[in-house]
Image: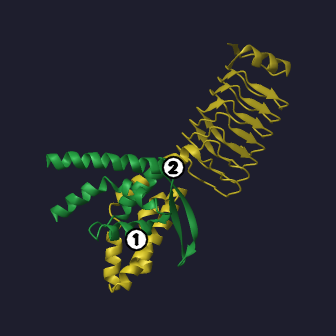
């Protein structure tokens, strides 16, 4: 019967296993129910009766889920998620909101971050090969020594995004808009920025050989800097 | 049966205040709270776990109570709840409101 009680409570929380608060509430509720079950038995109830009384005392599951959401929303806003040192290959991070999250030293190959908000998050020494970043908010996100090989980038917000010591060889940033983005010590060999818009973008100590800016638009400062680095800017418009 | 349901709905609106009152005499964990409510109501009101937790989580979010994990007992950990000064104020306010409402209802019903 105790096993059955475990299974019943677990079934209620099963859809919320990713949230820490759900696991905690599950543990808490289960502990209450086990004590309640034992009390019913002590008072002379049969195992079946005790089980039924205990399960009936849970009440409306929807009420429980509301209690969970109350906490979960708060958690998303307040707690910095730490996914460091984990193997999270093929993970689904779509539409998540992780402010100041830490994804350091973990393997996130082939994960999908589309429509997520990663403001202020750090990806240090993270394996992001073949990940998908579409419509992602990368404001103040730091990629340091991250493996970004084969990533798909589309329609992201690169406001103050910082790429440091990353190999971005051959990556396609076509049509993207960059604002105060920093590329520091990165290899951007053969990277493509066709039709991209660049405002106050810095390329510090980066390898810019054969980088493609055809059709790109950029502000004067970015232009002057790239021109000094002898980048081919023939197809560029100054804004 | 309809009678019972009604009274439970009436009581449900005051669960926050009941919990705040119980926590004034010391920190308590979930099952302890539900047992005390059952016993103190002369076994007339048995609070559902879901009702209690929606109240506990709301009170916690509003800063009226705090929670912490206690040591493991009987194989499991218990989470304890503690009332905050804000919770004490809220209790007094709710109790006052109830006294007023009670007077009004007694005249009207």
- Horizontal side of A42 relative to A190 (left or right) equals left
- Tell me where residue B32 sits by quadrant: bottom left
* Marks 2, 1: nearer the viewer: 2
- Indicate whether A31 appears above or below A96: below
Disc assigned to residue A178: none
Residue in front for this viewpoint, A232 or A115: A115
- Tell me where residue A44 sits by quadrant: bottom left
Q: What element does badge 2 sit on?
A: helix
x, y percent for residue A222:
76, 19
Label total for image: 2
Residue A10, visible in the rendered structure: no
| Chain letter of the residue beneath label 2 in the structure image | B
Mark 2 Cα-neighbour bin, 10 Å: few <14, some 14–19, many ≥20: few
| Chain letter of the residue beneath label 1 in the structure image | A
Name the residue tied to disc 1.
A8
Q: Colour of chain A?
A: yellow
x, y percent for residue A210:
79, 28
Label 2 and label 1: CA atoms lie apart by 37 Å
x, y percent for residue A76:
54, 46
Q: What element does badge 1 sit on?
A: helix
Chain ID for green: B
The quadrant of the rendering that contains the N terminus of chain A is: bottom left
Q: Residue at position x 51%, y 58% from top? A: B82
The quadrant of the rendering that contains the C terminus of chain A is: top right
x, y percent for residue A132:
61, 43
Name the residue tied to disc 2.
B85
């Amino acid at each position: 019967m105790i096993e059955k009680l475990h299974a019943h409570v677990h079934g209620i929380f099963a859809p919320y296993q990713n949230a820490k608060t759900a696991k905690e509430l599950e543990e808490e509720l289960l502990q209450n129910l086990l004590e309640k079950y034992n009390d019913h038995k002590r008072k002379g109830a049969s195992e079946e009766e005790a089980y039924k009384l205990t399960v009936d005392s849970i009440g409306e599951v929807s009420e429980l889920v509301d209690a969970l959401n109350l906490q979960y929303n708060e958690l998303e806003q307040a707690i910095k998620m730490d996914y460091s040192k984990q193997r999270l290959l093929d993970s689904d991070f779509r539409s998540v909101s992780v402010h100041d999250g830490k994804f350091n030293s973990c393997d996130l190959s082939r994960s999908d971050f589309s429509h997520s908000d990663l403001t202020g998050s750090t990806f240090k020494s993270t394996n992001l090969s073949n990940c998908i970043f579409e419509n992602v908010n990368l404001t103040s996100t730091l990629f340091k020594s991250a493996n970004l090989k084969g990533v798909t980038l589309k329609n992201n917000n690169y406001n103050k995004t910082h790429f440091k010591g990353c190999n971005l060889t051959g990556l396609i940033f076509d049509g993207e808009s960059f604002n105060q983005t920093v590329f520091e010590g990165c290899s951007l060999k053969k990277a493509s920025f066709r039709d991209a818009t660049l405002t106050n973008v810095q390329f510090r100590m980066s390898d810019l050989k054969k980088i493609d800016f055809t059709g790109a638009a950029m502000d004067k400062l970015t232009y002057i800097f790239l021109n000094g680095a002898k980048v081919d800017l023939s197809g560029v418009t100054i804004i | 049966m309809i009678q019972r349901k009604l009274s439970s709905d009436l009581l449900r609106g005051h669960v926050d205040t009941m919990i705040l009152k119980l926590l004034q005499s010391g920190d308590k964990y979930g099952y302890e709270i539900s047992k005390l409510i059952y016993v103190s109501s002369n076994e007339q009101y048995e609070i559902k776990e879901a009702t209690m937790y929606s109240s506990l989580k709301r009170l916690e979010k509003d800063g009226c109570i705090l929670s912490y994990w206690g040591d493991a007992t009987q194989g499991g950990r218990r989470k304890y709840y503690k009332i905050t000064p804000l919770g004490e104020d809220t209790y007094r306010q709710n109790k006052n409101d109830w006294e007023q409402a009670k007077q009004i209802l007694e005249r009207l019903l």
